[in-house]
Image (tube, rainbow, N blue to C red):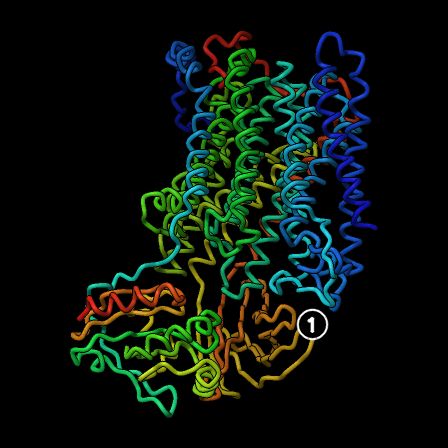
Amino acid sequence: MIAEFALALLWLAAALALLQLGLGSYALTVRGAQFLPAVRPVAVAQGVLVAVSFALLIVLFVRSDLSVKLVAANSHSLKPLIYKISGTWGNHEGSMLLWITVMGLAGGLIALLERRLNDRTLIATLAGQAFVSLGFYAFLLFASNPFERLNPAPAEGNGLNPLLQDPGLAFHPPTLYIGYVGLSIAFSFAIGAMVTRDVGPTFARAMRPWVLGAWIFLTLGIVAGSWWAYYTLGWGGWWFWDPVENASLMPWLAATALLHSVSVLATRGALKAWTVMLAVVAFSMSMVGTFLVRSGILTSVHAFAVDPERGSFILALLAIYIGGALALFGLRASTVTEGSRFHLFSREGALVMNNVLLVGILGIVLMGTLYPLVTEAFGTKVSVGPPYFNPVSAIFVFPMLVIMAVGPLMRWRQDNGKKLINLMAAPALALAVALALVVLFAGDIAILPLLGLIFAAGLAVASILPLWKRNLRRTPAHIYGMVLAHLGIAVALAGMAAESAFNTEKLVASEIGQTHTVGPWSIELQGIDPIAGPNWTALEARLVTRYGDSATQTVMNPQSRMFSSPPTATSHAALLTRWNGQLYVVLGEEGDDGRWQLRLWWKPFVPLIWYGGLLIGLGGILALVGRTARDLRRKDQPEYEPVAAPADPKPVGGREALA
Amino acid sequence: MNRWPRLPIPSPSEAARPWHEARPIMKHWAIWLPLAVFGVLFALFATGLIAPGDRTIVSQMIGKPLPAFDLPQAVPDRPAVTRANFTDGKPKLLNVFASWCVPCVAEAPYLQQLADVGVEINGVAIRDRGPDVQAFLARNGNPYARIGSDDVSKIQFDLGSSGVPETFVIDGKGMITYQHIGDIRAEHVPVILEKLKEAQ
């Protein structure tokens, strides 16, 4: 019964989305203006219905109702509760329902909370959100119904891929999804504003918190995903430039660019067309990513729900939504009024360059991801990996780091560079000291890690300079947010560079009782014991580790697990984190001679990658909270940054905004 | 403080003019650029969907001599395989298989058919154990004249084989003339016989 009821709710929600689109569009015409107030409640109701439908799917999974095909295919009655719940979104149909739920809830939240935006633009936005949702409702109801029954019901389910049975992965996909799909709000805002020709600072201020919110989730989701890949796949890597990873990175890059250009629009009324285009591109990248992952046109280690028919459906959605939005952009962007002018050497100028570089990186990632597809059309098979992505994106990343260091210290409109030169002495010094230290102690390392380390040092110092000589108590929270996020980039960069520069790895075949060294560690294999978990059995190694000459010994227990349903072997790495790095050990197979394979890594400073990622997310949260509190406090005042009055009140030859 | 050199700041009138004048033209086409880029992407995706590329990896070794190898015996009742077994003037099959491979079970009857008409098949068991291979042969029949055991996929990679099962036609002088990827089905048997005849 639950399944049928949930399916009925889903149909009802789809009908409401249709109503939301129809009513919203009619309300925008001259005659339909009296319907304007009716659209918000419809959007809220639609959000509630689809969310209840999703909640009921979770209930079906928790109760292991095997008469539902999706549950039977992905769950197992013996699975721990948390993985029964996470099984809901660990498959194609469930994750598409989560997708549409996030879209519905986002639309509902806008309808409930958004009060600053011009009413007509808001209604156009809600209609846009409904328009995009409808395509995905159709996809769900016609091509991937999650509530389909299975008759007769099997006695037991198939179980969930053991790699996915991990606490990290229980939360990584929904977090990523909220961010990924949350960007649909920016997309709908852009459509709404283009329809009503209302692109301006008010629009930007209204859109910013929603973009920021989605961006925070996306950031944390990517960080969690990278951490999960690092410790469950047992390869010791944290980023593989896999198509699925790139699919999450591309919307993030676009959203990051959007976040910065929306600030220019909110504060200075410039970059109108560019901001609107980025808002369209960000969610388009989410949709393209979904297409790449689910259509199976690219081979990926993540490959899930590969089905060309679904691929065609999603491709049709891409054509309608991305093609439609970009066509609307082409028609309307030239009619968007010109933005304010500014000088290239100014805060706006730095933000524009940052944007261009971010979009450049986005282009590089997109090209690298799609290149195998291009060559395949000509009959050659290639695989594009770190040797392309790392150096080529570095061409854009390092200039961007310089701008990140300098930009926040510049004035809006025009900067004379005097104060800047003085301030930049500190990061330059940090960079020089880092260079000296690296050359002195690390000796011979490759150029990219070297640049990474010294730029990280420079950026770390530069990122806190915006607080220099400021009254720290009166500094608004969003400034702290920016400082924290930029500092996070520096920290993460240091981790990435250190990982590739100082990593030591060892593969050994070990007898019981033998001691091995990797980096400063000595590791003794004391024994192998069998142990059992709820739905797996494992062989667990007892490794006694000791750092340098230290007296403390720590026991580490990497496991090689055998899951019963479906029968799959996974290796469960053991990690030991010290302040200066991480020891990573994986237990392999037993050889014919009774020796055990062990993979040992010493990765100096590698946790900085994720600490940095968390700092970036935390910075976003701080900015969101600060901005929202500030907006609530003074509702109607424009929020111009305090700018010193320019000597010439009319900037004669200011630079034109991209609009 | 003021001893630092001042950065050359372009004078406002200088900086703005080129952009200003170029703008109307820029606007005209650049505004449609995103749609054009998407059009290219769409075409690429559509071709990828309509004509999915062939994902099988064809060996680069076809037409080249069989690399030298000397594999240990896999099961007691069949001799080991070396490269020398392929140079006695008679074309033969080299079949890469494993007891853990399900398609290998499916192709076993067709290998038997080939063996029954007098084709000599030499097998290479990939990453396998002797008792497992024996059990596999007991269950599915044993069409092999010789079986070698390749514990680390060394020979498999040397052959340019990317998976199990694969079957190679080797002419009497040790040249690889044909590669069959995947399990051999009923319709492939005549093809392979034809290739063996060509290799004569």
- Give the residue displayed 64% in from the left and 27% down from the top: A188
Looking at the rendered structure, the number of numbered marks drawn on it comes to 1
Q: Is residue A132 above or below residue B173?
A: above
Report the chain holding disc 1: A
Query: Can you see residue A227?
Result: yes
Image quarter of residue A53: top right
Q: Residue A300 at what x, y percent from top left?
A: 48, 53
The amino acid on which the numbered mark 1 sits, given as a three-letter code, is Asn
Q: Relative to residue A235, is residue A68 drawn left or right?
A: right
Q: Secondary structure at mark 1?
A: loop
Q: Position of residue A621 (x, y in %)?
A: 69, 40
Give A325 or A493, whichever is nearer the viewer: A325
Quadrant position of residue A463: top right
Of residues B54 and A188, the one nearer the viewer is B54
In this rendering, the answer to whether A437 lies above or below A353 is: below
Tell me the residue that label 1 is attached to: A535
Viewer-side residue, A346 vs B178 = B178
B183 sits left or right of A475 in the view: left
